[in-house]
Amino acid sequence: MLISKMAAEGGGKEMNEIKTQFTTREGVYKLLTHSEYSRPNRVPFNSQGSNPVKVSFVNVNDQSGNGDRICFNVGRELYFYIYKGVRKAADLSKPIDKRIYKGTQPTCHDFNHLTATAESVSLLVGFSAGQVQLIDPIKKETSKLFNEERLIDKSRVTCVKWVPGSESLFLVSHASGNMYLYNVEHTCGTTAPHYQLLKQGENYSVHTCKSKSTRNPLLKWTVGEGALNEFAFSPDGKFLACVSQDGFLRVFNFDAVELHGTMKSYFGGLLCVCWSPDGKYIVAGGEDDLVTVWSFLDCRVIARGHGHKSWVSVVAFDHYTTSVEESDPMEFSGSDEDFQDQMIHFGRDRANSTQSRLSKRNSTDSRPVSVTYRFGSVGQDTQLCLWDLTEDILFPHLPLSRTRTHTNVMNATSPPAGATIITNTSSNTTNGNNSGANTPGINSLATTLPRSNSLPHSAATTATANNTNKASSGGGIGSGIMDSAIATGVSKFATLSLHDRKERHHEKDHKRNHSMGHISSKSSDKLNLLTKTKTDPAKTLGTLLCPRMEDVPLLEPLICKKIAHERLTVLIFLEDCLVTACQEGFICTWARPGKVGLLSSQNQASSPSGTVV
């Protein structure tokens, strides 16, 4: 059984083989080859020098029950199809709309979900020359072109999004580092806009457009140094997270136009950003090959994830697997198999009310709560990584009574050793509780840390970081320096376990050291000199803005699989599947466990040539 499973996953074959399925605690995810979307001729796109392939979805709520629509750009082309997902094979011969552009390429797009109907959708498309087009691919209309004469900004559009809850406002970021707020009802002027300063802060400024009549852009944001690579609105629409080429994540209160908090990458630019379903955490990825988890409430880095061997191009939370369990501690009196079954059952809990259930959890609640956030990342290394963010990482700083700590220590040591590796649920609270209470038994538990969670060296240091952070109420650079002074003292001992790990993984790590790896502080200082920003990276490393590697928990991916020949540019989690795309222009659908259903039986009956045009 196990051997055939390994063969199916390519376990015994060469490492470079592309995977068509992978297994997590919830079951097996399978690539649906018949649900692949691409250009109609299915010819791999020559991606040299072209903009990343991007994908947007919208549901038009038509009566047929098949209301999903997909839009994607490949080179100079833009396609709009009915998306059949896990239900039926893709029919590439019938795009609802197809556009080919001359002299410029589409770079990004976004549907307005508020106004979408079966008869009409509003799709914004950003272009490499700086323009933004509003089109309706159902009516096949092009209603408006913004920044047509490129008087507002001449640089490439990096991200475009409708403002949440609005039918007419949208935000556009550019490679110039500027962001503009537009209203579809207003026109752009025939001359370059004049601006008036509205608000200024550390490394950002916001201007309003000075004109007799209201015209676009309504606001101009100048953020950081270099390109503004991506932005994302919080789930409630009140906050805006931006990542820039200068390596900074900046989070703004969008309406008040105020900076809420910042974070700096380990090195290089940040390329992608996303919010957790409840808005409490932000994940960013970029040129340091890491995924970095930042707490919105504490304004600090709480974990980093290392699994990619090259730049991380997309990060996204899986709203359907993120879960909160409010229950009594699980009984672990059975065998290993029983325990695994319990875990698999837990993993399948994918209620759509994730957000409301997450918001119920507050620090004063003494009932045991098991929290797991699932997020994913794809990178230029052609790999997909899935990560679990568990409560031993999230809540190490909760004030805990001694009795509760010891009770949990007892709970943690009772399940069999094999079981602890599988679980990412309530038993892991011990790591957090120990670090919070700073109990002496920390080393005895180090070996039971699950592989998706923090390395043993991080726990004690996290505790000191949290205490200083609390004392300074949110803290700033000053508390960060104090923090690092304490942390370095602890980390002298902590890095011993990191060193042992390095020895064990030496063969695996030596290939990636040029890119990221476990970099020593000496080499990182040299690398940091290369980043040309006003903020000296040497001054940020070791502060709250950018903690040292040994000062925060290091996550390891649940899975890390090569799934494409070209660099990956898309990762979207849907209810029945997850969607990835690579630079060759192939959009792939991966069915969630138990969601293959009808399509797989059809696939076995029909030949693959049936869907080739």
Image (cartoon, rainbow, N blue to C red):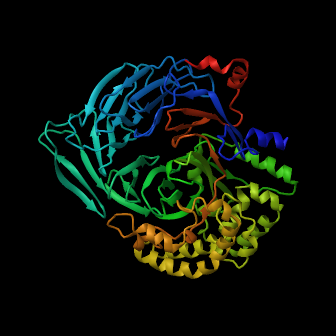
Query: What's the residue at 61%, 47% (across, down)?
Result: 322
Q: Quadrant of residue 216?
A: top left
- Residue 349: x, y in percent? 69, 43
Q: Is residue 337 left or right of residue 320?
A: right
Query: What's the residue at 57%, 22% (across, down)?
Result: 90
- Residue 602: x, y in percent? 70, 20
Query: What's the residue at 73%, 41% (across, down)?
Result: 9
From the viewer's side, name the closer residue of 181 and 126.
Answer: 126
- Residue 21: x, y in percent? 69, 38
- Residue 439: x, y in percent? 69, 77
* Rendered view: 373 above or below 80: below
* Rendered view: 592 above or below 245: above
Q: Is residue 15 left or right of residue 105?
A: right
Q: Quadrant of residue 555?
A: bottom right
Say if residue 487 shows up in the picture: yes
Count the marks: how many?
0
